[in-house]
Image (tube, rainbow, N blue to C red):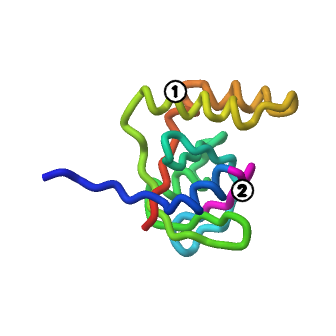
């Protein structure tokens, strides 16, 4: 039996892709945190800079349901780790393409490090 992956509607993907920062919130209690976001192959990805025990990445790992705020809208999401090394590399490349200012260089290089690639989550509509 084939599994179906839920996808965001095109208007949401476009809004997310245009946004430099979105808010994410795991569960109902975790606070909103601003994060960089990229779209790869029409799919939405976020990556944590600091893998802290109290951070948003670990909160999503404990409770995969939450919210993504883009503009003035909150979209219910489910977070899941990608399983493909090819996709992780594509996400790293997407960060470099989207965040291409001189001020972003250090962060983009850091996001491509293996430990940070390991904190990548895909967000899908819940």
Q: Does residue 10 appear in this view? A: yes
Residue named by callout 2? 34
Helix, strand or loop at label 1? It is: helix
Given the current orientation, which residue lies at the most extreme front position? 10
- Which residue sits at x=37%, y=37%? 83
In the image: residue 70, left or right of residue 39: right
Mark 2 in CB contact with mark 1 (< 8 angstroms) = no
Tag 2's secondary structure? Answer: strand
Q: Is residue 9 magenta?
A: no
The residue at 70%/24% (across/down) is 109
Can the viewer see residue 63 in this picture?
no
Sort mark 1 into few (<14), some (14-19) or many (20+) by Cα contacts within 10 Å. some
- Label 2 – label 1 distance at C-alpha: 22 Å
What's the magenta region?
18-24
Give the image quarter of residue 114: top right
Q: Nearer the viewer, mark 2 or mark 1?
A: 1
Q: Locate residue 92, reporting x and y percent.
A: 59, 30
Answer with mark 2 or mark 1, whichever residue precedes in sequence.
Answer: 2
Q: Which residue is mark 1?
A: 89
């Amino acid at each position: 039996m084939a599994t179906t992956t839920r996808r965001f509607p095109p208007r949401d993907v476009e809004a997310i892709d245009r946004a430099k920062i979105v808010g994410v919130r795991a569960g109902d209690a975790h606070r909103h945190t601003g994060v960089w976001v990229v779209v790869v192959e029409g799919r939405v990805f976020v990556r944590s800079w600091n893998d802290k025990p109290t951070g948003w990445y670990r909160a999503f790992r404990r409770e995969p349901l939450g919210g993504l705020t883009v503009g003035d809208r909150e979209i219910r999401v489910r977070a899941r780790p990608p399983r493909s090394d090819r996709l992780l590399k594509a996400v790293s490349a997407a960060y470099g393409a989207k965040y291409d200012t001189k001020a972003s260089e250090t962060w983009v290089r850091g996001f491509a490090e293996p430990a940070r690639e390991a904190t990548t989550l895909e967000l899908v509509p819940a």
